[in-house]
Amino acid sequence: MKKRFLKPTEDPLWLRLFLGAVAIAFIAILLLLPLALVFKEAFANGIGAFWTAIKEPDTLASVRLSLIAAGIAVPLNMVFGIAAAWCITKYDFPGKTFLVTLIDLPFSVSPVVAGLIYVLVFGAQGWFGRSLADNNIHILFAVPGIVLATIFVTFPFVARELIPLMADQGRDEEEAAATLGATGFQTFLRVTLPNIKWGLLYGVLLCNARALGEFGAVSVVSGHIRGVTNTMPLHVQLLYDNYDYPGAFTVAALLAMLALLTLALKSLLEWRYADELAAAHRH
């Protein structure tokens, strides 16, 4: 009987099956099962009870605040990400490596530490605390502090998606457009933006998901004022600590729905524009 030799890159069937089973079990136990339990508990008393919990004023206030924070943080981080990626990839200047390192800072700093930094800067005993109080400006325990904390923890996502993409594309197309008389804004709209649109979209989706789910930094600067400064994740904790388990799971299920909606949008775009997305990610 002729012995079959495996190619250097071909693994045995048993190993492929084993690794696949491990991956599926890992996903099922750590992701799908908890998600299913959240929805099970949220709808345990029926759709009517679920809807009643959603319409509770404090819950609606937390939803509104989360959407406001994400609605401000995501566009600002999109602008910052495009500007930072453009600056880093199109120009050479001293300190470029240091700037790239600073962009990664929120990935390495705990969100709780980030929140404490804002307390030190804007708190009553902080650097600007006295001046803010004298002018009746509220940063901490108010919407501005929540927005600032959300911006801090989410600002690397768009930039980190665009920097390698724009670096690989180089400067040739922009320079050619400039020689043809295009202004900087025209060059961006007609040359740069079409080349980075899918990377930009991925970064925005990741940024939005992170903004809606942020807990640590927002928890420090919010003050946990029910119905005023509680975002959805903070409201889940508040309800759970008060033994309102149906309400907590209801808000958690709503958060999960928003995450699944983001994932569905991402998957739909991948399916609809598969070839263009693949071309973008090859960069």
Image (cartoon, rainbow, N blue to C red):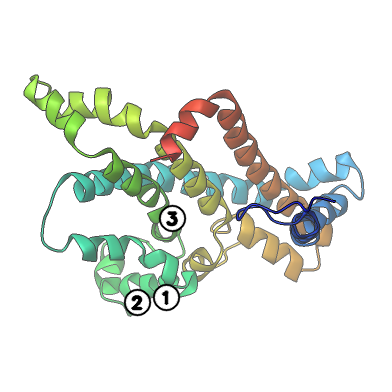
Q: Going from the N terminus, do you reach mark 3 or mark 1 first?
A: 1
Residue type of the residue flagged with mark 1: Leu
**Residue at the top extreme?**
180
Tell me if 159 is positioned left or right of 240 in this view. left
Residue type of the residue flagged with mark 2: Leu
Residue 161 shows which numbered tag? none
Tell me if 102 is positioned left or right of 148 in this view. left
Q: CA distance from mark 2 to mark 1?
A: 6 Å
Q: Residue 106 at what x, y percent from top left? A: 40, 65
The one nearer the camera, 237 or 93, is: 93
Residue shown at 25%/26% (left/top)? Answer: 191
Answer yes or no: is residue 140 visible: no
Does dot 2 land on a helix, a strand or a loop? helix
Does dot 3 land on a helix, a strand or a loop? helix
Q: CA distance from mark 3 to mark 2?
A: 20 Å
Residue on which the image places disc 2:
120
Residue 154 shows which numbered tag? 3
Q: Residue 238 at what x, y percent from top left? A: 68, 65
Please tell me in which quadrant of the rendered image residue 25 appears: bottom right
Residue shown at 23%/29% (left/top)? Answer: 188
Is the Cβ of the residue at disc 2 closer than 8 Å to that at disc 1? yes
Residue 116 shows which numbered tag? 1
